[in-house]
Amino acid sequence: MSQLQRLLRTTAFRAALLYACVFSLLSALGLGFIYWSTASYVEGQVDARLRLETEVLLNLYQRQSLPALLESIHRRTQEDQQRIYFYALWGPDSRALAGQLSAWPSGLDAQRTYATLHLNDVIKVHDSHKNDLVRVLVTDLPEGYRLLVGRDLHEEQAMLAHTFSITLSVVGVIFLLAMGGSMVFGQASLRRIDTVNRTAGDIIAGDLSQRIPLSGRDNEFDELGRKLNEMLNRIEQLMAGMRQVTDNVAHDLRKPLNRLRNRLEVTLLEARHEDEYRGVLEQSIQDADELLKTFNALLSIAQAEAGMKRNDWGKVDLRELVEDLADLYGAVAEDKGIQFEWHAPEDTALRLYGNRHLLAQAIGNLLDNAVKYTPDGGHIEFSAQAEHSIIRVIVADSGPGIPAADRNRVLQRFVRLDSARSQPGNGLGLSLVSAVAKLHKARLELADNQPGLRVILCFDKAV
Amino acid sequence: MLPGRDGLSIIKTLREANIVTPVLVLSALGEVDDRVQGLTAGGDDYLVKPFAFSELLARLQALARRVHPEQQRTFLKVADLELDCLKRKVTRGGQKILLQPREFRLLEYLMRHEGQVVTRTMLLENVWDYHFDPQTNVIDVHISRLRGKIDKDFAKPLLHTVRGAGYSLYEA
């Protein structure tokens, strides 16, 4: 598509063109009206002169009788070298008594009639003026005489023609200027759109770092560009996050799969006792189960992050949940020689709208961690409390805790602190807690329990 | 997804025709919602794909036994271990055993599935009503506590660990 064709299709050009047409039409109407009123003013002036001339002649006739009139007509005709005025007097017997007229113009018989005729109809002329117009006033005199006074409209016509051509050229110039303006306008908007298009093309081609350049004029295009750039930033962020997750998944699952594969390979190297095979197989199943667990955890996080399936949400009594989970994990803690205390008051304020299973899994993960990282003889405190519209679920342990600098990092998928490497785990537990917290619009705080970690899930029912 | 028809409508049709053959729903849809739908349609159990074979086997055995309407049984007995659901009383060899409420439910579930393998997931689902994988083996701890109460002081152990699968309660 050529540049001109594109220009002609732009909305800006079309709108400007429409305005140009409307504006030209309006100015044509306005100037046309001026032309028309000028023409009628000129005609009125001519008619007034004819009337005046007729009055003078009529006066002459009434006061001094016919010969004086004839004399006057004759004299006037003689004096009028340029042949601007015409006079004629007819007798009752339709005989021409005076004037230049060769014959009575047809269609003129009413009393006091104005008419516009062709010069040629009035007198015989053989020059270029024969198509000029003549304005005549016919007056019937008493006793059957008839007087005609005419005026050549040559000058007036020339003036009107001049006015008309000026009007026409002004309308033309206005139209051309408006057209030109709309072209410039369309071109300017096209240029701005083109920069957006170019950027989009680059991004489609794979360069996500491209941004729409802003003109700095702070106009609507800049506003659009800024919003689009913001959107692109967000997309780039999400893409980077996703790429990181995918990389992490690949990296973290490769290790256990390799281990599994190598064990099987080594086992096959030489003949072994059946019990040994059985042992390796059982261990392999366990490894596979661990891998499946990782995948399940990833799926749970994805599900919690997507925030879909609101129809399995309902009223959750956190007191009941805390009691259940305390029962489930308290035994594990006590088995490890950890002092486990839980507390949740019987309080309707501890009820909230949420997904019971996801909440149980998230809080379960926190308890899992607490039990895993708290040394023998340590203690874990598990509680839920409501204060105004805010519900806090707290899991506090006396383990090694998490250094302040790492507290945000551990919420990412697969992040495991070096100090935790000796413990089994996949680095997904806190990611799930974080996702579930976000899904429930809760705040997740990791704090120092001095010593140990204090995790606070803060639900604000007012939000 | 079955070709042409969905499984749930088939179960509904079966149930409307008064066919009580136990049905285990195997589905890729693992949401709680989907489970509830499967069970209300008339399914007896619901297992999410992909699953471990030991899990499937244990659940099938559990279903095969359930054909006899033993849900109403309020008095359970395995060897000399007796459980009275109404009086909430457990004895072994005539000796009274004190159990926490949750331990009682755990034992009741195991006794109702006497001789079958019961997986950890089944226990978490049926005794605690949770559908998730705990990272640590919380169930093992509860089992060992229960074992300490019902088996420790007696010659013949009743609660057995099935390696790689779960647990089973039976008289060897």
Image (cartoon, coloured by chain):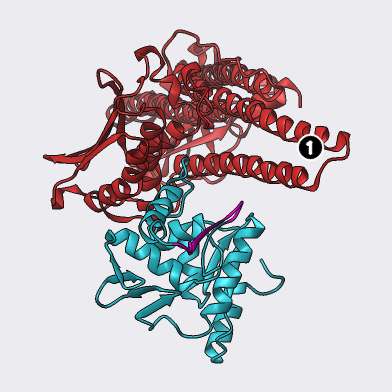
Q: Quadrant of residue A261?
A: top right
* The N terminus of chain B lies in quadrant: bottom right
**Residue A86 visible in the displayed image:** no
Q: Which chain is red?
A: A
Relative to the observer, which residue lies in front, B80 or A380? Answer: B80
Relative to the observer, which residue lies in front, B58 or A375? Answer: A375
Q: Quadrant of residue B130?
A: bottom left
**Above or below, comparing residue A80 to residue B10 in the picture:** above
Chain B color in figure: cyan
Which residue is depicted at the point 76% across and 23% down? Answer: A2
Which residue is depicted at the point 51% across and 85% down? Answer: B68
Q: Position of residue A382 (x, y in %)?
A: 25, 38
Q: Position of residue B73 (x, y in %)?
A: 38, 82
Which residue is depicted at the point 44% across and 23% down? Answer: A410
Q: Which residues are magenta?
A: B155-165
Q: Position of residue A333 (x, y in %)?
A: 34, 38
* The C terminus of chain B lies in quadrant: bottom right
Q: Which residue is mark 1?
A: A264
Relative to the observer, which residue lies in front, A424 or A120? Answer: A424
- Identify residue type, mark 1: Leu
**Residue A53 visible in the displayed image:** yes
Q: Is residue A184 magenta?
A: no
Q: Is residue B160 magenta?
A: yes
Q: Residues within 10 Å of mark 1 (few under 14, many from 20)?
A: some
Residue at disc 1, secondary structure: helix
